[in-house]
Image: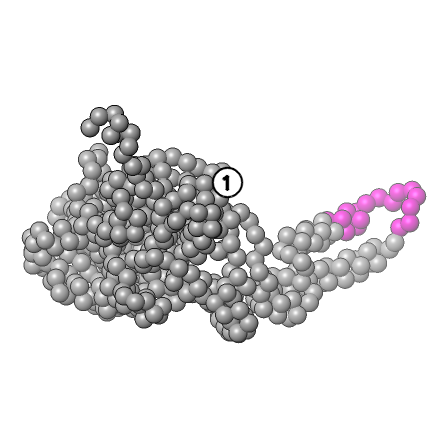
Amino acid sequence: MDRGEAAAAPAPRRVVMVVPNRIDGDSRVQKAAASIAAAGFETHLVGVSVTGEAERYEQDGARFHKIPLPKMDPPASLRRFVGALRYPLAYRDAERARRRARHVKAARYELEALAIAPKGRGGLRLPLLVHRAGRKAERVWIGRRVAQTKARDRFAKRDDGRLERLEGRWWGLLLGDRAWRRLDVNMLRFELAFRPEIVALEPDLLHAHDAYSVGVCVRAAAHLRRRGKDVKVVYDAHEFVPGHEGLGARKLDAQSRWERQYLPGADAVVTVSRPLAKLLKERHGLDREPAVVLNAPLGDPPARPDPGDVRSDFGLDAGTPLAVYSGWASPERQLEVMLEAARLVPGLHMAFLVSRHDTNPYVKRLRELAEDLGIADRLHFRGYVAYEDLPRFLSTADMGIHPMPTGSVNHEIALPNKFFEYCHARLPLVVTEVKTLSAEVRRLGNGEVFTSGDARSLADAIGRILADPDRYRRAYRDPELLAEYSWEHQALEYVRIYKELIGG
């Protein structure tokens, strides 16, 4: 190729991935960006900075743009209105209440000083009893106001869904799916942070990761089209929004409406499992099921320094039974059942690779429970391992456990990261009877299923694996299984969709 031909070569198509988080702990997003960059697209990620400053850097062939979220007052809520009526003596805010409480404390010190102060000259001196009566009345009055402030704030934080559902129905009748703007301000915060960056980058395609991003991207694409720039939008649904637990009724209603309003504006929809694809098609009346890109690990990770392994990391020899859990640690994960099961399996050690293992209050409670159960010496914690290294790091364990509770829609339809990571580590799995995950483990024969929350059932499943581990590892002898469950294979679907929409 001569210089003239090289000069005429078209510039690579520009993709901007929009992520409503810090990106750092989101392995799906990081792997997607690296794969799309490797496929020849100019790849950018726009996410959240928590430093208070914009951050820009390159990593794995992609350019990262992290923007701090602006602060905004939340929309007025029915709960706060009811709280104001219910607790009329409450101070405007908690800080004002704390200041008044300090005033009461200071007045008590002053009263003590008056009792021992020598008589001085000049000035009006009231009898000490009068001072005491006045201070007591002030203390009672301020105490009531402080107590009401605390009660009002507790009431405001409560989200049992009753007032929130009433409020959502009211705004839904008035505004339809546009009611999200009356329920959650975070959509606008993300848009204020990300829109200028998106517009400046002039993308050919916007890839919206998760529900918060879909409206941001669809609205930004409409803005760019009005300016003459044709932009396509891909929505990557990481979970079933109406089944999201832990958001609270108000935010859940807002996110569900936001997604329902803007998902039709996407040119293509991708998701993380076949059952979720079916749900999305039914809920949003899509012409076809979304494409599926599983949350698989890298099958052929790049050469990296040896990360070590979980067994040697905790000083355990090859003969020590070792189960691992890798992922988020929170009360919703119900990890206590693993400790209770460990007590029932003599000599079993358990290793947890979790975020903030040294500061997480939930991890502290797990340590305390281990002390109470008498297994503290068999419980081990450490932080996350880079996603590129995780399967190799876990591979010296005897099994991987995922005690995902049953009942939640998102749990029932999920094939979570842990499943694929444990598979690539060639570990036998122990999982609960959540529908999709347990069906896959039974189909492959690479693990055991136990009853959610039942320590005895979990201990029995662990015992069966320890008795014949080779039986469960046999599934991994099929090279096609791990090839299909590799990110390299899964990412081909992204590339296909991109080329279909924008060429390149």
User: Badge 1 local density, few (<14 within 10 Å), some, or many (20+)?
Assistant: few
- The residue to which callout 1 is attached is 52
Quarter occupied by the C terminus: top left
The front one of 324 and 408 is 408
Q: Which residues are magenta?
A: 109-125
Display colour scheme: one colour
Q: Secondary structure at mark 1?
A: loop
Query: Residue 165, position in %: x, y?
Result: 50, 72
Residue 311: x and y in percent read 19, 44
The residue shown at (38%, 39%) is: 64
Indicate the quadrant containing the N terminus: top left, top right, bottom left or bottom right: top left
Q: Is residue 47 left or right of residue 119?
A: left
Q: Position of residue 453 (x, y in %)?
A: 28, 67
494 in relation to 246, above or below: above
Residue at left 28%, top 61%?
A: 290
Number of residue marks: 1
Looking at the image, can residue 290 be seen? yes
Q: Quadrant of residue 163?
A: bottom right
Lateral position of residue 249 relative to residue 410, left or right: right
Q: Of 373 and 442, which appears nearest the observer?
A: 442
